[in-house]
Image (cartoon, coloured by chain):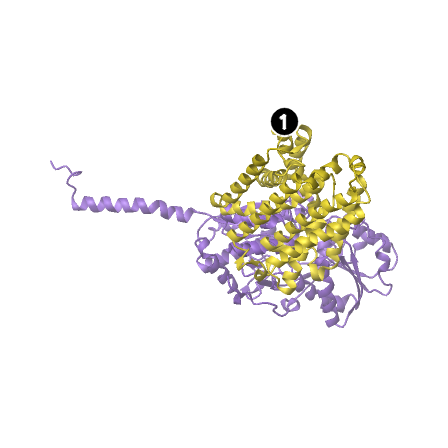
Amino acid sequence: MTNTLLHPTRRGLLMAGGAGLLTAALPGYVGAQAAPIKIGFQLHRTGIGASYGRWYERTAQAALKLINDGGGIAGRPVEILFEDDGTDPKRGPEVVDKLTQSDGSDVVMGTLFSNVVIASAPRAGELKVPYLVCSEGYHVASGILNRWTMQPGITDVRSQITAMAPWVSANLGKKVAMIFPDFAFGHDHRDFFTAAMAAQGGEVIAQIAIPPTETSFTRYLPQIPAETEVLYHVMVGPAVLTFVKELGEFYGTGAKPQFFGFIDSLEAVDTATPGLEFLEGSHFWEAHNRVKPADAGEHEDAYRAAVGVDDNGASVSDAADIATYSHMFSTWETLFAIKAGMEASGYTGPADRQKFVEAMEAMTDLPYGIERPQGAKVFNGKTHQVFGTQNISQVQGGKLVRVHQTSMADGAYGDAVDYTTMAF
Amino acid sequence: MTGGGARIWALHAAVLVVVFAAQYWLSPYHATNLARIMVLAVFAMGYNLAFGYTGLLSLGHALLLAAGMYAASIPAQLWGWTAGPALIAGIAAGGLMAGAVGLLALRTAGVSFMIVTLMFAQAGFLTILYFAPVTGGDDGFALPAASRTILGFSLATDTPRFLAAFGLFASGLLASLALVRSSFGRTMVAMRENEERSRMLGYNPFTVKLAALVISGLYAGGAGAAWALLFGYAGASFASIQYSILPMLYVLLGGAGTVLGPFLGAVLMFYLIEFASDLTSAYLFIVGLALVILVLFAPKGILGTIRERWARWLP
C-alpha cells in the first residue's frame, strides 16, 4: 500500500493546492465583502444645535436602514459612527479627527452650524477626507473652504433667499423691513435679500439687527417703519419663541404688515402654540414642507414613514414633538449622494477618497426619487453646492400650507469658485 | 519655593522630554490632540500666573485669547502674513489688551474685578460680532493655507504643527518657572497672600498686579494666535464666556499656583471630555461631577494636594 502522505499523486497535489488556495482566498474575499463602509457623522447632539441634531440622527438612521436593506453601498454594508461636537467650533475639528484617524471613517458628514463647518473644514482638508456638510451656509459655494468639502444634500442660504424675493415682491409688498440676528447668519439674510429685492424693484426700508445676547425684543419693534408692507423675520436660538410672541403682542389686534419669515424662526416649534395665533395668514419659507402638501410627491409617504414623522411633521410617537422637517432631509439626501458617489467611483477604501470627490464633482442632475424626497436637484461640481426648489407656506388654521413652489432657476446665482481647479 | 533648584529644573526638563518624545509613540490622532492640549495649556499657564500666583480671579481671559487670535489671523487673512510675524502680533495684542483692561479693572478687586473683567470680555465678544465683515463674526473664517507656514514648513502638517506647539509650550513653561522662582514671582505671591502687608513693605500692588496681568495676557494672546495658525480657524466663539471659564477649570483641576498644574489640568480635562463623550451625551455632567468631587476632596487641585502632602518643594 502506498502512503499518499509521503508519496502524493499529482491529482492529490492539485486538489490539495486548490483547496489551500481557496482556503487562503476565501476569508479575504468574504472579509472584503463584509467590511462595512464607515460614515462618520459629526452630530450636534448637545449645544445650541441639539434640537436639529436629534432629528438629523433619526433621519440618518432611517436612510441608513433603507440603504442597507437595499444591499448597502456597492454590495458592502454601511455603518454610521455618530460623534457629538457640542455645536462647538473648537470641538468640531477634534471630532473630524476622531472619526477619521481613530474610528477609521471613510467619509465624514452631517454638520449643520456654519461656525462648526468653517472650523472643521480645514482639518478635513489636512486629513484629505471627504467632508459632506448639511449646513445651508453660503460658505461652501463662496469658495472659502477646500476641495474636500461639499454640500450635496441641501441648498444654501443665498439660493434660498434669492428665490424668495420674486414671490415676496409680487404678492406681499415692495417695502420691506427686516429683523435678523446681528451675526453672520443674519447678515447673509440682510445682504442677499436686500440685493434680491432691489433686483425685483422692491426696497428694504429698515434693517433691524438684534444682538445675539438679547432675550427680550420689545424695544426693537418700534423701529419698524409705519409704511412697512412686509416684515421679514429670521431668528434662531433659544429666544425665538419669545421673539415671535412679543411680535404678536406689539401689533395686537391692530393693523399690521404682511409677515414673511424663514421657518428657522419656528423650526421644531408647533405653529399652533398658544400665543402664536397672530401668525395666522403669515408666510414662511420652507425647504421641505412640514405639513404634507395635498399634491406631495409619490415618495413623501415612504420618507415620512421611514423617519417616523406624521402628516403634520410631528413624531409618530408624540404629536407634540415637531421635527426640524425643513432641514433634516439633508442628511438623508447626503447619505444617498455618498452612495452614488462611491458606486460611481468604484470606491474600495480610503485610498480612493480622491476618486470619490472627483466622482461627486462629475455629478449634475439628481432626479426626484426616494433618494431625494425634498425634490429634484442639480449639483454644481465646480462650487460643490447643490441647487433645488424652495417652498412658501402660509399659516392656515394653525397649520403651514404650501402656497407656492419656486423653480430651480429662481435660486440660481453665478459661480464664485471652481474647486475642481484646486489641488487636493 | 526656595531650594531644590536642580531637582525642580530636572523635573520640568523631564516633563518636556516626555512631552516631546510623545510624538514618536503616540498615534497621529493623539499626537494632534497633544498639540491642541499644549496650546490650551499655554493659555492656562497664563491664567495661572494671574489667578494662581497673583490672586487675580479674572472672568475675562477669553478677551485676551481672542485678541491674540484675531491679531494673528486678520493680518494673515488680509495681508498674507506668515505664522512668525502673526504669532508675534498675537502675543503683543494679548499683552496690550491685558494692559488696557488692567488699567481700569485693577481699580477694583475681588468680586468687582470678576464682574468688570467679565463685562470687558462680553463687550469684546459683541465687538467681534459687530465687525463681522472683518472678523467673520460668529461664523469666523478659515485661515489661508499660505499664511500657515513658518520657516518654510506648513503648520497644516503633523510634525511642524507638533513642534510649533511644543516650542510655544516649552518656552511658556520655562518662562513661567523662571518667573515664579524670581523675586518678582515672590512679589506676585505676596499680593495674593496679603496685599496690605505688601504695600506696607513698599510694593505698589497696582503695578505688580498690572505687570502680572500683562504677562498673563502675553500667554493668552500667544495661545489664541497659535490656535488660529496651527488649526486654521478664527471665530467669535473663542471670545465667549466659555473660554474665560476653561482656563480656570484647567488650573483648578491641575493645581492653582503650581507651574505644571495648568498642563496637567488641560490634559485631564481634554481626555475626560473625550472619554465621557463616548459613554453618554451628558458628558458635561460627568465633567461637572468630577469638578465637584475635586473641590470637595482636593480643593488645591491635584498638584496642589501633592505639594501640600508629599512634595513641598514643587514650584
- Chain A colour? purple
In the rendered view, does A49 fall on the left or right side of B278?
A: right
**Residue A29 rendering spot, x and y as whole percentages:** 36, 48
The percent coordinates of residue A62 (x first, y second) are 56, 48
Percent of width and height locating residue A184: 70, 58
Taking B51 as reference, is A45 left or right? left
Q: Secondary structure at mark 1?
A: helix
Mark 1 chain: B
Comparing A75 with A29, the one in front is A29
Name which residue lies at 63% across and 42% down.
Answer: B178
- The single residue placed furthest to the front in the displayed view is B202
Of residues A349 and A280, which is closer to you in this image?
Answer: A349
Q: What is the count of numbered marks?
A: 1
The residue carrying pointer 1 sits among few (fewer than 14), some (14 to 19) or many (20 or more) residues within 10 Å by Cα, namely: few
Quarter that holds the N terminus of chain A: top left
Q: Which residue is mark 1?
A: B309
Kindly identify the residue that appears in the image at 71 percent across and 45 percent down: B244
On the image, which quarter does residue B50 sit in?
A: top right
Farthest left residue in view: A1
Q: Is residue A243 left or right of residue B232?
A: right
In the displayed structure, would residue B59 be above or below residue B68? above
Q: Which chain appears yellow?
A: B
Residue B118 visible in the current orientation: yes
**Residue occupying image coordinates x 59% and y 67%:** A417
Viewer can see residue A398: no
Q: Position of residue B86 (x, y in %)?
A: 63, 58
Where A230 sits versus A61, above or below? below
What amino acid is at disc 1? Arg
Check the image and name the residue furthest to the right. A254
